[in-house]
């Protein structure tokens, strides 16, 4: 039975209120009277029992199971006694706990198929190409069959959607989601964002930047980790709240350093700051060096584990101007490097994670 939640109540007001909350969470819920609840009792991830039906449910001798919530209009000693009798793990009071119930519906509607790998990319200086590397990694991952989200964590960076030629595509940007809070359905997030193939982009609108609430950032990153195989965050050197949240969520953070003396010195201080927010910091060196500084010398100076080295592709600036980075990334040193890096990470497609769940 393909339903996320079973609502057991004979009270129309309770049923209507809970169905409204289920709709807000994009969750499929069905209402059943106590007499009809036995057949569906074991199937859904979530069972909500109205206070009016608690006595009948207790008398019916239904088997104990997880995910049962007693829904009442007030939290009284009798309410908690009824919850114990039906084996409920939680008590929700309407309307006080509406957001909690929306989150519970949303959680019940999604299979526990594991979490995405989250990567952050940070450049040691402006113009080094961290945004290009982030986008190229996203294109390579999506091309290999991974559901990938590119998160633009820089409100002043010009927009990742523009770099990929998606600026005219319909879909939500950060300002549209700036006040979001609570659990967000992962499928809803995927359907909401502009995309090309298996690559979705969370970017910015043109004009003045809009502040994004901390709760919205956490909600979006959580939904992204549930709905994608790979999340790639393009984080500026001064990360701000969005960048810091992405760094804290990251499995790996890559620090991109060109083979230049000043950039290497800057990277040393930046690495110390990044270590406060990210657990696994690795170095990527970009050549060629204008003065003969070798990747080995950069590595020795910074003392970071090395994820790889690649040569700057001179075709990319023109491709970015034309919004055609995808075409330019089909071949060349950057695309080869991205393929090697993704192979080293050994990422698993979402469909395989679902089968393993």
Image (tube, rainbow, N blue to C red):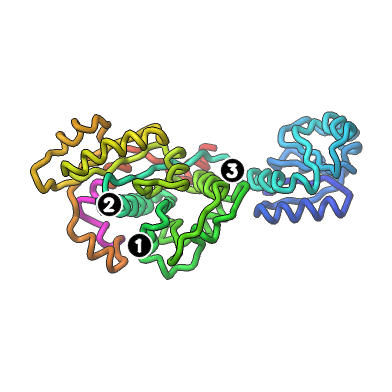
Please identify, in this view, whether the residue under mark 1 or under mark 2 is nearer the observer.
Answer: 2
| Closest to the observer, 164 or 175 | 175
Q: Which residue is tagged 1?
A: 164
| Closest to the observer, 217 or 64 | 217
Describe the element under mark 3 as helix, strand or loop. loop
Q: Is tag 1's residue or tag 2's residue first in the polypeptide sequence?
A: 2
Identity of the residue drawn at 50% across and 46% down: 221
Q: Which residue is tagged 3?
A: 111
User: How many other residues sit within 10 Å of disc 2, few (<14), some (14-19) or many (≥20)?
Assistant: few
Could you tell me residue 336's position as x and y percent?
A: 23, 48
User: How many other residues sit within 10 Å of disc 3, few (<14), some (14-19) or many (≥20)?
Assistant: few
Mark drawn on residue 126? 2
Q: Is residue 298 visible?
A: yes
Q: Is tag 1's residue or tag 3's residue first in the polypeptide sequence?
A: 3
Describe the element under mark 1 as helix, strand or loop. loop
Q: Is residue 339 visible?
A: no
Q: Tell me: 131 left or right of 83.
A: left
Could you tell me residue 191's position as x and y percent?
A: 53, 59
Identity of the residue drawn at 41% across and 67% down: 167
Residue 220 in magenta? no
Identity of the residue drawn at 87% across and 35% down: 76
User: Which quarter of the rendering shows the C terminus?
Assistant: top right
Please identify, in this view, whether the residue under mark 3 or under mark 2 is nearer the observer.
Answer: 2
Q: Is tag 3's residue or tag 2's residue first in the polypeptide sequence?
A: 3
Identity of the residue drawn at 87% across and 41% down: 51
Could you tell me residue 339's position as x and y percent?
A: 28, 46
Residue 331 in magenta? yes
Report the span colored magenta: 326-337
Of helix, strand and loop, which mostly describes the magenta segment? helix
């Amino acid at each position: 039975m393909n339903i996320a939640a079973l609502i057991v109540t004979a009270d129309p007001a309770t049923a209507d209120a809970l169905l409204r909350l289920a709709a807000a969470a994009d969750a499929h819920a069905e209402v059943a009277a106590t007499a009809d609840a036995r057949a569906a009792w074991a199937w859904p991830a979530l069972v909500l029992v109205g206070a009016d039906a608690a006595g009948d449910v207790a008398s019916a001798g239904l088997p104990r199971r997880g995910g049962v919530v007693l829904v009442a209009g007030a939290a009284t000693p009798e309410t908690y006694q009824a919850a114990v009798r039906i084996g409920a793990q939680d008590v929700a009071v309407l309307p006080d706990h509406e957001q909690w119930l929306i989150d519970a519906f949303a959680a019940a509607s999604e299979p526990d198929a594991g979490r995405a790998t989250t990567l952050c990319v940070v450049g040691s200086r402006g113009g080094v190409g961290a945004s290009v590397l982030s986008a190229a990694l996203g294109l390579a991952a999506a091309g290999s069959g991974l559901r990938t989200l590119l998160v633009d964590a820089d409100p002043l960076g010009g927009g990742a959607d523009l770099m990929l030629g998606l600026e005219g595509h319909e879909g939500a940007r950060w300002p549209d989601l700036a006040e979001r809070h609570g659990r967000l359905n992962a499928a809803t997030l995927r359907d909401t964002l502009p995309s090309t193939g298996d690559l979705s982009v969370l970017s910015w609108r043109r004009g003045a930047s809009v502040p994004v609430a901390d709760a919205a950032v956490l909600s979006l990153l959580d939904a992204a980790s549930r709905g994608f195989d790979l999340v790639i965050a393009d984080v500026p050197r001064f990360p701000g709240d969005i960048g810091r949240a992405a760094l804290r969520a990251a499995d790996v953070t890559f620090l991109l350093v060109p083979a230049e003396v000043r950039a290497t010195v800057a990277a040393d201080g930046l690495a110390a700051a990044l270590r406060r927010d990210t657990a696994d910091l690795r170095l990527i060196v970009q050549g060629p060096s204008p003065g003969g500084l070798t990747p080995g010398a950069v590595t020795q100076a910074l003392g970071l584990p090395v994820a790889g080295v690649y040569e700057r592709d001179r075709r990319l600036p023109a491709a970015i101007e034309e919004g055609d980075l995808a075409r330019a990334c089909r071949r060349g040193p950057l695309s080869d490097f991205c393929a090697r890096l993704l192979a080293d990470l050994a990422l698993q497609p979402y469909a395989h994670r679902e089968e393993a769940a």
